[in-house]
Amino acid sequence: MDISVVVPLFNEAESLPELHAWIQRVMQANNFSYEIIFVNDGSTDNSWDVIEELSKKDGNVKAIKFRRNYGKSPALYCGFKKAQGNVVITMDADLQDSPDEIPGLYHMIKDEGYDLVSGYKQKRYDPLSKTIPTKLFNATARKISGIHNLHDFNCGLKAYRRDVVKNIEVYGEMHRYIPYLAKNAGFTKIGEKVVHHQARKYGHSKFGINRFFNGYLDLLTLWFLTNFGKKPMHVFGFIGSIVFFIGFLSLCWLFGEKIYNLCNGVYGDLLSQHASFFVALTALILGSQFFLAGFIGDLISRQNPSRNDYQIEKEID
Ligand code: UDP
Ligand code: MG
């Protein structure tokens, strides 16, 4: 099979027939063998009935129905597990992404050797309150992930070589960082294609303003997991040792000074009357806390069942 189109959806009943007909038209015009996998993420409208109707008319329609709303990432995760096409294309259900982009994306994966191609909505039809934070968000994501050629990490329209989707785990709200996940899994040929974007035709956006806050926290987590997930002691132990050492040296200095003064018959203030004494004590305590955090982190990462999951590209027996 050439292409699997994975469509996560939450209450998008009005858009589905139009989206399905459009995808079908593009696939037939290009002679692609394909499947469309609708992942109904706990919709409370009649999306599922619409999908059932479509599947009766078209044997290429497959679907998954969640018992409740889990989020876009879990929907993609399950769609990816089911996908059989050589190229997997994800697309939002709200008609903001155009199925006319499918052939172009397909050829970039198939003929130009890309592992992942992300859509780039250069001209967006979204409110300013969304486009400005998005610019900032993408700049940070580029810097942290080291994928410098992507302008639009969170574009719903993306194409993947099948290996990619079978070897990454999209969880929580990590759909915003799939290129970063792919890069961590060793798929480095990541490209971009400028795509048409349209205003939402039916319904409303399913993500509120907290998308940005959560997005940044997720980016931080991902950065930490990528760099230190398997060796937390390297970061906490390092910080802990430095802080502890500073505290220890300052205390030695304070005690030494006190003893020197006493020997010379100068009694002076009590050590506890100096702020530096408390600063040194705090540093000692903080240092050992950091160290312990690293130690416990290492113990946890040893217990992690995926501690020995490595991406093996080929094997000869
Ligand atoms: N979506 C989903 N589960 C959710 C939220 C959204 O499957 O919990 C789907 C939604 O139906 C749409 C896609 O994810 O197909 C993108 O959502 P939306 O258009 O609301 O996001 P925006 O375009 O505002 O970023
Ligand atoms: Mg949308």
Image: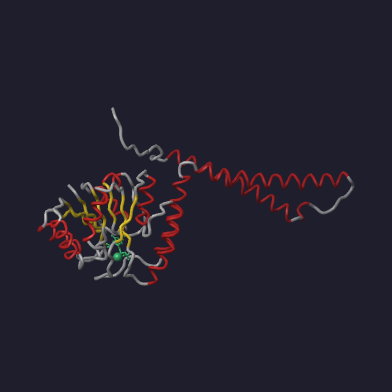
Give residue 298's position: percent from left, percent from top: 49, 41
* Residue farthest along the left direction in this orientation: 57
Give residue 73's position: percent from left, percent from top: 32, 55
Image quadrant for the C terminus? Answer: top left
Whether residue 182 sits left or right of residue 161 in the image: it is: right
Whether residue 166 sits left or right of residue 27 in the image: it is: right
* Residue farthest along the front direction in this orientation: 112
Colour basis? secondary structure
The quadrant where ligand 1 appears is bottom left
**Which residue is drawn at the image coordinates 20% and 51% (left, top)?**
3
**Which residue is drawn at the image coordinates 81% and 47% (left, top)?**
258
Whether residue 107 sits left or right of residue 295 in the image: it is: left
State how many labels appear: 0
Q: Quadrant of residue 309?
A: top left
Give residue 303's position: percent from left, percent from top: 43, 39
Give residue 110's position: percent from left, percent from top: 24, 48
Q: Quadrant of residue 212?
A: bottom left
* Residue farthest along the right direction in this orientation: 265
Establish if 259 lies above or below 220.
Answer: above
Question: Who is closer to the viewer here, 209 or 186?
Answer: 186
Establish if 216 lies above or below 233.
Answer: below
Question: Who is closer to the viewer here, 271 or 73?
Answer: 73
